[in-house]
Image (tube, rainbow, N blue to C red):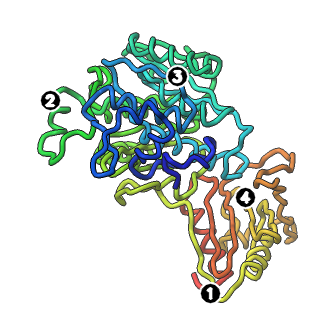
Amino acid sequence: MASSSSSATTITERSYYDGDVDFDALATKDADFAVICKVSKDKRWIDFQDPKVVQQLTESLLKCDFGISSIELPDDRLCPPVPVRWNYIRWIQELLDATSDTYSDRYDPGREVVGLDIGVGASCIYSLLACSSRPQWRMAGTDIDQHSLEYARKNVEANGMNKRIKLMLSTSDSPLIPLDAMKMEELDFVMTNPPFYSSAEDMQASYTGKQAPPSAVCTGAENEMICPGGDIGFVTRILEKSLKLRERVQWYTAMLGKMSSLQQVVAKLKEQGITNFAVTCLQAGHRTKRWAVAWSFQDYRPRNDVARHGELVHAVLPAPTAQTIAVPSMDAKSAGERIDATVRELDVRWQWRPSSSVGLMEAKENVWSRAARRKQKFASAGEKEKPKDVTMGSDGADESGEEEDAVGLAVKITCKNEAVELQWMRGSDHVLFTSFCGLLKRALTGRA
């Protein structure tokens, strides 16, 4: 994965920060950062307890890694560490790339995306990172703090983002997702980095008993650190709103301060019957860990490594969206021919690409069970309609031009030497996905 020193990586392809910032590389690129560094035993380090030093680190990373060259941070508001913030944005990018209606599972530079950041803060860092890295993305942002919003607007204007980032003052009584007030019918995603603590006592307790002090000085105002119910309470209110808005937002997402918070939020999602969710550990460096959760009422399923991203406990993991069938001594061509023959016997939409050994199957329902096959056999005087072809473009998109039928399951099949990979692209029923995987396993290996 790329680190902050990977200058060869373009902004739109930048990966996660996966380690501590390389101070030597950053000092070489930015003279302002070099000035604040200290050197001992030929190793650069900085004083994370000095607010001005922490501000300079943020400003230098934004400038050198993302081209955000003008940012003003007040002394009495949070100074956002860049790596974890970028990792949150990057994860959202992967979520959206992996759940588009084209089934392309990759970044589409032409796709227009609109997101909402609840609580932009003085830096407006999430909106600036999102828009600087994806030229077709636009952001809306809200905040209940007029002081922070004034700085956020300055930062948007200073970076020439006025037409792509729109900010609005909110109140504690306003809807958290104010689509009507913003005159928006729908959004691609909602994000928030809410206050983690429910009270000053709760915040103090989080530091008690820890062997090491906080990794960096905290300059956050009370409204940035504390809210009723802490991060769980805040995200619960977003969840309640999402139950009303539902598909008007494709992905509802939130950052959380503790693994225990993630566990409680995932439990609440399950209580509501929400099965299409994703989780991540947004670790950047050796000390900073945050977690994030996303959920959707649509049926496009994220790639398995996106839905279950980072170091996590089993209890929070969603159902897997991938299976691999081992086919020892079988090459990709032979496996593909067997799968193509099997799927063509079904009443499904299907395209197989022999040149790349990749196929895409769409089904309305389970048409491969014994009961479904008997029903099909005796329908229409015993003559079965051939499966419709799904005409995919170079990126895997359906280009048939036909009106789309209802889709109960979509699966991408990739054949490799000695293995077949199955990716759940769409659908609401995990049992249906595993059932289809079982069909192909029997066809390939003769075993259930």
Q: Residue 88: give x, y in percent of width and height.
A: 47, 41
**Residue beneath the point at 61% across and 21% down:** 161
The answer to whether residue 243 is left or right of residue 325 is left
| Residue 423, position as x, y percentages in the image | 62, 62
Q: Nearer the viewer, mark 3 or mark 4?
A: 3
- Disc 3 or disc 2, which is closer to the eye? 3
Q: According to the image, label 3 marks what residue?
A: 70
Instruction: Report the Cα–Cα distance between label 2 and label 4.
Output: 53 Å
Q: Earlier in the sequence, mark 2 or mark 4?
A: 2
Judge whether residue 277 can be spotted in this image. no
What's the distance in space between the residues labelled 3 and 2, CA to CA?
A: 36 Å
Q: Determine the CA span between mark 1 and mark 2.
A: 59 Å
Of the image marks 1 and 3, the number of the one nearer the N terminus: 3
Q: Secondary structure at mark 1?
A: loop
Could you tell me which residue is drawn at 56 percent across and 21 percent down? 179
Q: Which mark is residue 328?
A: 1
Q: Which residue is tagged 2?
A: 201
- Can you give x and y, in whole percent of width and height, for residue 434 in the image? 57, 67
- Per the rendering, the mark at residue 57 is none
Q: CA distance from mark 4 to mark 1?
A: 27 Å
> Looking at numbered disc 3 in the image, what kind of residue is underneath it?
Ser
Question: Residue 414 appears at what percent x and percent y?
Answer: 69, 68
Vertical placement of residue 147 versus 258, above or below: above
Give, as a three-letter code, the residue at label 1: Pro
Give how far apart the Cα atoms at labels 1 and 3 are: 56 Å
Q: Residue at x 58, y 21 (%)?
A: 159
Give the residue displayed 35% in from the left and 33% down from the top: 36
Q: Is residue 441 left or right of residue 405?
A: left
Q: Which mark is residue 362?
A: 4
